Amino acid sequence: MKTVVVTEVEFRKASASFEKACAAGWKCIPAPPGEAEVAEAIRRSGATHAVVGVQRYVAALYDALPRGGVLARFGVGHDGVDKQKATAKGILCVNTPGVLDDSVAEYALGLMLAAARHTLEMAAGCRAHQWSPRVGTELLDKRLAVIGCGPIGCRVARAASAGFGMHVVGAEIRDVDEEALRQSFGFARVVKDFSAAVAGAHFVSLHIPNVPQTRHFINRERLSQIPPSAWLINTARGAVVDESALFDALNSGTLSGAALDVFESEPYVPVDPGKDLRSLTNVILTPHVSSATHEACTRMAERALHNIALAEAGNFSEMDLLNPEVLK
């Protein structure tokens, strides 16, 4: 019997998928997301694998899982998983790439629409028995800078250009086939220079991973390069934005607004008590839900379980392995 500990939030998001696995002979055990609790659940149940969410795991989990066990990230970003420590312990780390791209891309566009049409403010007004209509703007012919032209960034570009008639410029540090991106996803052009990408932009949408090189990528200098009338959209990772610098830009009016689904600390805690983003009226904040659709959660659960099944069968080459050096 395959025994898997699953953090409670992720279990609830795709309970039908985990229950289906149980009906097929697996044993899926929900556990609180704290590292000590997950590690204890693994030891108590004798589990050989774990499926975890976005929380950081730095110590006890790697001592609890056996050599050859799978640590599956329920999602794409894996900055909360210590691949080096897992490799030293012989643990296979995987994620679920590709299965949530459309959900995140749709959400990024939804945040742009909400910002352009003042949707949240007017909805709150109606709930408060206030009739306060506001004039918004169309997305048609507006300029969108997509920072990071990976799978999600490309889907945002395609929806924005083909669906809303936006002018999309991509920024990507890697060498890419610009013509292919233009033909398949509607980019007008792709550049390596951030300032060139955001010049004249009405919206700047972030789609870069959280790695040491991208920590606080959006800093004071880069914020100063974004037009004051633009909105910053972040559905990537909170740590790629310097939240203190962002607060100052929003508070001073050097940036029109920001729509954020991810934060350096989650649940959100201001990096500076005097710079609470929740106190600003030109900010939309949501609790890291861009990938939280029934469809994407089902696909993430199935992909995580599929990776575990591949490991059990020894088909390591077919896994979404994040630390292939562990095989050595």
Image: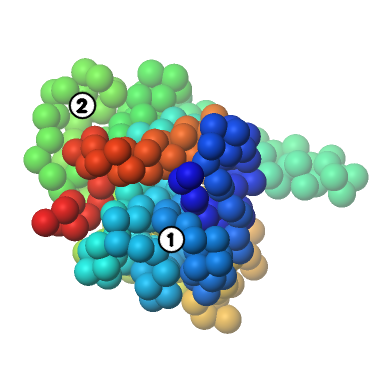
Residue 273: x and y, percent? 58, 81
Badge 1 density bin: few <14, some 14–19, many ≥20, Cα 10 Å: many
What is the distance, in whole Å, between disc 1 and disc 2 at their CAs? Answer: 26 Å
Judged left or right of residue 43, residue 211 is left
Residue 140 x/y as whole percent: 45, 24
Say left or right for 215 vs 6: left
- In the rendered structure, which amino acid carries the disc numbered 1? Gly
Which residue occupies the foreground of this view, 136 or 53? 53
The residue at 11%/56% (across/down) is 328
Give SS at disc 2: helix
On screen, residue 107 above or below 80: above
Of the pair 312 and 204, the residue shown nearer to us: 312
Residue 194 visible, this orientation? yes
Comparing 56 with 216, the one in front is 56
Q: Which amino acid does label 2 sit on?
A: Leu
**Pointer 1: what residue?**
238
**Does residue 103 appear in this view?**
no
Against 244, is 161 above or below?
above
Residue neighbourhood size for the residue with mark 2, other residues' Cα within 10 Å, grouped as few (<14), some (14–19), many (≥20): some
* Residue in view at x 52 percent, y 55 percent: 5
Residue 122 image point, x, y percent:
74, 42
Q: Which residue is drawn at 35% across and 47% down?
A: 95
The residue tagged 2 is 181
Going from the N terminus, do you reach mark 1 or mark 2 first?
Answer: 2
